[in-house]
Image (spheres, rainbow, N blue to C red):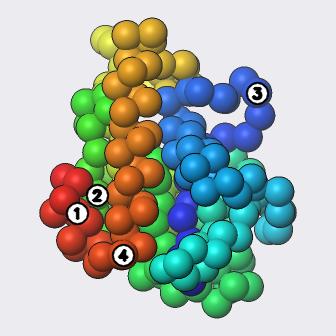
Amino acid sequence: MKLIIGLGNPGKPYEYTRHNIGFEVIDALAKEWNAPLTQSKFNGMYATVHRPEGKVILLKPLTYMNLSGECVRPLMEYFDIDVEDIIVIYDDLDLETGKLRLRQKGSAGGHNGIKSLIQHLGTQQFNRIRVGVSRPPAGMKVSDYVLAKFSKEDAPIVTDAIQKSVAAVETSLKKSFVDVMNEFN
């Protein structure tokens, strides 16, 4: 069983913001797979999908970004999912908007959602898809920037990044994550 986790913040004010790119990818997967996130457990919304490659859970933690691990860890334990069978999708300030970077391990890099996951999972070694959102303009607070919506100019780039992330997840169900990294990085 695989667990695909999109990080973000719940609620209307956060929809379509840079920090919610993980939620956007999960929504795109749910739409493509015709699997609405209607189940809830451990303060998260999820869908269980039966694919030819096996069972997959799509998850959006509703704990707010900084507490994502509080949802993910108990859900992994409940469904008996190993850490090597998860993929976490989230925004990255250090990548140009729309650029993807897939990794199997690493530090939080200042990302509070990833800090929470590392703390609750007890490891930095988990698969991730980082989606670039670029750095804020000079003088703008990072928190204001990541909680702002993408510009109209960035919209097609972000849509493309979401579709590439969906393709990376789908490919990961058929190939090793190393192969997926080589294909999508």
Q: Position of residue 49 (x, y in %)?
A: 66, 69
Q: CA distance from mark 1 to mark 3?
A: 33 Å
Task: Compare marks 3 and 2 and give the one earlier in the sequence.
Answer: 3
Residue type indicated by callout 2: Leu
Q: Secondary structure at mark 4?
A: loop
Q: CA distance from mark 2 to mark 1?
A: 5 Å
Image-based side of 167 in relation to 51, left or right: left
Q: CA distance from mark 1 to mark 4?
A: 13 Å
Q: Residue at x 64, y 90 (%)?
A: 80
- The residue where tag 3 is placed is 12
Viewer-proximal residue among 147 and 180 = 180
User: Which numbered marker is on residue 181?
Assistant: 1
- Of circles 1 and 3, the one toward us is 1
Residue type indicated by callout 3: Lys
User: Which numbered marker is on residue 102?
Assistant: 2
Q: Secondary structure at mark 2?
A: strand
**For the N terminus, which image quadrant?**
bottom right
Residue type indicated by callout 4: Lys
Q: Estimate how packed mark 2 is, as few (under 14), some (14 to 19) or many (20 or more) residues with alpha carbons within 10 Å.
A: many
Measured along the vertical axis of the image, is residue 32 above or below residue 21? below
Q: Residue at x 26, y 50 (%)?
A: 101
Viewer-proximal residue among 150 and 183 = 183
Badges 2 and 1: C-beta atoms under 8 Å apart? yes
User: Which numbered marker is on residue 174?
Assistant: 4
Task: Compare marks 3 and 4 and give the one earlier in the sequence.
Answer: 3
Residue type indicated by callout 1: Met
Which quadrant of the view contains residue 58? bottom right
Q: Secondary structure at mark 1?
A: helix
Task: Compare marks 4 and 2 and give the one earlier in the sequence.
Answer: 2
Badges 3 and 4: C-beta atoms under 8 Å apart? no
